[in-house]
Amino acid sequence: QLENAIRLFVALHNHSPKPFVWIKTADQILASIRRFCQRTSETGH
């Protein structure tokens, strides 16, 4: 069933593909990376 579901998804997507659109600015990406680094550096590992 899983394989059939995946094949159906791919077939439908390929029938009507849409381009990937990135909507974040460089500043938003860098801010997200900063938040991630702060969270991971404060874990005490």
Image (cartoon, grey):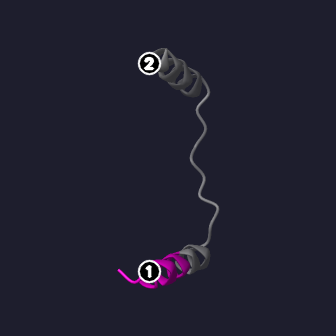
Q: Height in image: 16 above or below 33?
A: above
User: x and y percent of residue 15 in the render?
Assistant: 58, 22
Q: Nearer the viewer, residue 5 or 30?
A: 5
Q: Callout 2: 10 Å neighbours few (<14), some, many (20+)?
A: few
Q: What's the magenta region? A: 33-45
User: x and y percent of residue 18 in the render?
Assistant: 61, 38
How far is disc 2 from disc 1 in space, using C-alphas? 39 Å
Residue at image location 58% in from the left, 80% down from the top: 31
Tell me the SS state at disc 2. helix
Precedes in sequence: disc 2 or disc 1: 2
User: x and y percent of residue 40 in the render?
Assistant: 45, 78
Mark number, residue 3: 2
User: x and y percent of residue 34 in the render?
Assistant: 52, 82
Q: Main secondary structure of the magenta part?
A: helix
Question: Outermost residue toward the front?
Answer: 44
Q: Callout 1: 10 Å neighbours few (<14), some, many (20+)?
A: few
Pointers 2 and 1 in contact (C-beta within 8 Å) = no
Residue at image location 49% in from the left, 14% down from the top: 1
Tell me the SS state at disc 1. loop
Question: Outermost residue toward the left?
Answer: 45
Residue linked to disc 1: 43
Query: In which quadrant is the C terminus drawn?
Result: bottom left
Type of amino acid under label 1: Thr
Residue at image location 51% in from the left, 79% down from the top: 39
Q: Height in image: 5 above or below 24?
A: above
Rendered image quadrant of residue 13: top right
Type of amino acid under label 2: Glu
Residue at image location 51% in from the left, 25% down from the top: 10
Q: Nearer the viewer, residue 34 or 1?
A: 1
* Residue 26 part of the magenta-drawn span: no
Q: Is 28 placed left or right of 1 in the picture?
A: right
